[in-house]
Amino acid sequence: MVAIEARDGARIAVRDSHGAGRTFVFLHGLGVPSALFDPLCDQLPGDWRVIRPDFRGHGGSAGAPAPRGLDDLADDVADLLTAKALDDVVIVGWSMGAMVAWEYLLRHGAARTAGLVCIDMTAKLANDATWRLGLRDGRDLAAVEAVADGLVADWPVFSDGLATALAPMGDEAARDALSARTRALAADNAPETLAALWRSMARKDFRNTLQRITTPTLVAYGAKSTFYARETSEDVASRLANARLVEFPEAGHAPHLDDPNAFAAALKAFVDVIDASTPARASAAPGE
């Protein structure tokens, strides 16, 4: 693992496979660092270059200065692409990572981006009287924000619940092994930073801005997700200008963990679509 320097001087830890082929940037979810992508990375072509930053508060970046919110994480992604002189990348964002990817494209444009993969995420986390496609349990903004308090008060208990929720849908041995790994990876996180990021997520609303993202996009979801309903991913795909939807019938919130072979195959097929398209790359207009 190496580190890049963000614009505020923070050191952001990064895993880089240094492959010579298509370049991917994987953005992880809240509470678990980029090492949780390992099972998927093991299934990817060896010539792909896979770059995985640890967001502030997570893993190797746990000691980085706390961000004000997802906007700062998006700027960190921009600094990563600049530091490594990356172009024509495919960004893969899971859960919170999908929101960070959207924020990056909206703030910085898509000149460096060939494709986008969003994994099981909503355009707006909190539910209200007119919006029921947020968290599947129906929580409103007050209830969503309250999660942050519990996260800080007892991170070990919260991380145990997260590990259980992310356990794969496969056999019991696989579930136990991944749950144990998730707990171990989460142990060194900075809960105060995670709480700040959760509050930022709670207040984000991408419903009126996703249409500005015209980058070719794959919207992936697990049919058995306990976080979001199928209709949530359908909604995200409908708001993006150039998106297609793929379902993983036996997967939950983390289809890349539940079925890494099938997910790797979906990524390969998506790259084939990108490579077969016209050379002109799609873009998103930067700015708020």
Image (spheres, grey):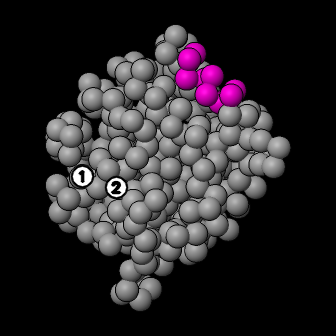
Question: Which secondary structure lies at badge 1?
Answer: helix
Disc 1: which residue:
80
Q: Earlier in the sequence, mark 2 or mark 1?
A: 2
Rendered residue at 37%/86% (across/down): 280
Distance from label 2 to label 1 (Cα)?
A: 10 Å
Residue 226, given in percent of the width and then of the height, sits at: 70, 37
Image quarter where the N terminus lies is: top left
How would you classify the magenta stretch by its main secondary structure? helix
Residue sitting nearer the eye, 157 or 273: 157
The residue type indicated by label 2 comes to Val
Query: Could you say which quadrant of the image residue 203 lies in?
Result: top right
Query: Could you say which quadrant of the image residue 285 lies in?
Result: bottom left
Disc 2: which residue:
25
Mark 2 and mark 1 residues within 8 Å of each other at the beta carbon: yes
Q: Is residue 72 above or below residue 101?
A: above
Residue 189 lies within the magenta run: no
